[in-house]
Amino acid sequence: MKSFCNEILILSSVVHPNLVKLHGYCIDPKGLLLVYEYWSTISMGQRAYVEKGP
């Protein structure tokens, strides 16, 4: 549980155009969940190429 909480702290502070943003989390007896933003139109690889260029 401690490592999950550390991950939340780190991921919520990271800001970079090629990384999806952490929107939230859920701690439930059935499991742990991280909620990220959704990129609907292109893959992460395509987005990195478009943002940075050739």
Image: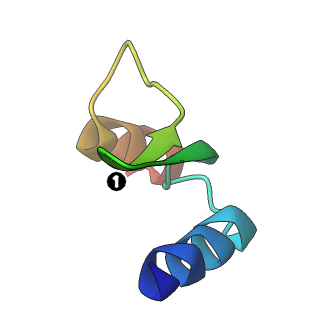
Q: Which residue lies at the image location 34% right of the left edge and 53% below the top edge?
A: 54
Left or right for 36, reference 43: right
In terms of depth relative to the viewer, which is nearer, 43 or 51?
A: 43
In terms of depth relative to the viewer, which is nearer, 20 or 29?
A: 29
- Estimate the x, y position of residue 12 in percent, counting from the top left: 69, 63
Left or right for 13, reference 6: right
In terms of depth relative to the viewer, which is nearer, 36 or 52?
A: 36
Mark 1 secondary-structure assignment: loop
- Estimate the x, y position of residue 26 in percent, counting from the top left: 53, 44
- Estimate the x, y position of residue 17 in percent, counting from the top left: 60, 52
- Estimate the x, y position of residue 53 in percent, counting from the top left: 43, 49
Q: Quick one: label 1, few (<14), some, or many (20+) residues within 10 Å?
A: few
Q: Which residue lies at the image location 54% right of the left edge and 32% below the top edge?
A: 37
Q: Is residue 15 above or below residue 23?
A: below
- The structure's colour scheme is rainbow
Task: Classify the position of the N terminus by image quarter.
Answer: bottom left
Q: Which residue lies at the image location 51% right of the left edge and 76% below the top edge?
A: 7
Q: Amino acid at mark 1?
A: Pro
Residue holding disc 1 = 54
Q: Is residue 4 above or below residue 3?
A: above
How many circles with numbers are drawn on the protein? 1
As drawn, which residue projects farthest toward the top?
41
Q: Is residue 41 above or below residue 18?
A: above
Q: Which residue lies at the image location 74% right of the left edge and 71% below the top edge?
A: 13
